Amino acid sequence: MRVKASLLLLSFVLAGVAYPADTSAVDTTQLAAWLTAGVSNSRLARLVQERGLANLPTRNELCQLESAGADSTLIRV
């Protein structure tokens, strides 16, 4: 039952990224959550390019994003 609930939650998260109703700027917390959920770096880089960043990430936040799986392309964007 837990696995089904987890998969359902993951599908909602991924659906929200695939078809975002919210076009506001993204922040590093959202990026880390999406990386953890398995959203690809290329998709997140496109989102950042389309929607912009809510604020400039600190060096510490960039390191945390790298730890969450951000590649050099996403970090550069």
Image (cartoon, helix red, strand yellow):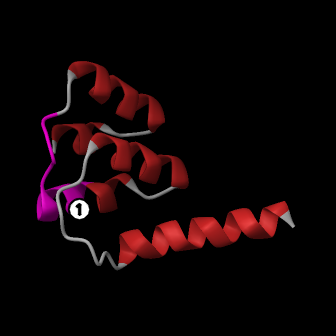
Residue closest to the eye, 21 or 48: 21
The magenta stretch is 45-56
Q: Residues within 10 Å of mark 1 (few under 14, many from 20)?
A: many
Could you tell me residue 7's position as x and y percent?
69, 68
Residue drawn at point x = 37 percent, y = 34 percent: 65
Residue annotated with mark 1: 47
Could you tell me residue 14's position as x and y percent?
48, 69
Quadrant that contains the N terminus:
bottom right
Could you tell me residue 20's position as x and y percent?
31, 75
54 magenta-colored: yes
Residue drawn at point x = 45 percent, y = 58 percent: 39
Quadrant that contains the C terminus:
top left
In the figure, is residue 31 to the left or right of 9?
A: left
Say if 42 sits above or below 67 in the image: below
Say if 30 sits above or below 22 in the image: above
Q: Residue furthest right?
A: 1
Residue kind at label 1, given as amino acid type: Leu
